[in-house]
Image: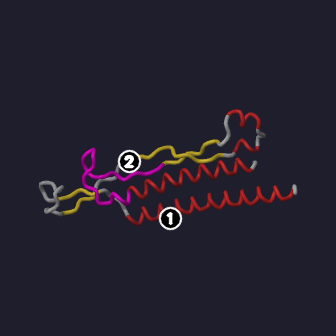
Amino acid sequence: MDFMTAMDISASGLKAQRTHLNVISMNMANIRTTKTMEGGPYRRKSVSFEATPVYSPFDTAMQNQLNRELNGVKVLGVTADQRPFRQVYEPDHPDANDQGYVFYPDINVVEEMTNMMSATRGYEANVQTITAVKQMFTRALRIGM
């Protein structure tokens, strides 16, 4: 594996974790949203990841068998969660139904914070990898001097 391949793999991880953090922050921002453009309360979103090869088909043909197993990550999609809404009795709320209940998204703050910490750690690990690759590249250049 060359330096640029290691950077490509880490860059794919950074991009995926950034998307994950954006979705988590969107969930946290809409924790009390009772009305959306589609009507009804906000639906919690989640991100799916998929392993993806970092080489183009030409690169794959030219590389040896050991390097063909290298994969990065990409976001497969952002899906709306199908959990039932949380009902809260608030008869004075403008979005309350006939019985006085308001429907809120079922977003658990602890779950979202745990996901945020996990995504942050993944992001930091990829940054550390890029930093280590840059240091190795710099040291390799000094060998030739």
User: Does residue 78 belong to the magenta stretch?
Assistant: no
Q: Position of residue 91 (x, y in %)?
A: 14, 62
Identify the element where label 1 is drawn. Answer: helix
Check if residue 29 falls in the magenta segment: yes
Q: Which residue appears at 43% of the width and 57% of the height?
A: 24
Considering depth in this image, is 48 or 11 the residue closer to the camera?
Answer: 11
The CA distance from mark 2 to mark 1 is 21 Å
Crowd class of label 1 (few under 14; some 14 to 19; many from 20; radius 10 Å): few
Q: Residues within 10 Å of mark 2 (few under 14, many from 20)?
A: few
Q: Amino acid at mark 2?
A: Ala
Q: In the displayed structure, would residue 56 be above or below residue 82? A: above
Q: In the displayed image of the protein, which residue is found farthest to the bottom?
A: 110
Q: Which residue is mark 2?
A: 80
Amino acid bearing label 1: Met
Q: Is residue 125 left or right of residue 144?
A: left
Q: Which residues are magenta?
A: 27-47
Q: Earlier in the sequence, mark 2 or mark 1?
A: 2
Q: Who is closer to the viewer here, 3 or 48?
A: 3
**Extreme-front residue of the structure:** 145
Vertical order, 23 against 52 (above or below): below
Q: Are marks 2 and 1 in contact (CB under 8 Å)?
A: no
Residue 135 in picture, x, y percent from top left: 74, 60
Q: Which mark is residue 117?
A: 1
- Residue 137 occupies quadrant: bottom right
Task: Where is residue 106? Give x, y as percent.
Answer: 32, 58
Give me the residue at 74% from left, 44% from top.
67
For this view, does 37 lie left or right of residue 96? Answer: right
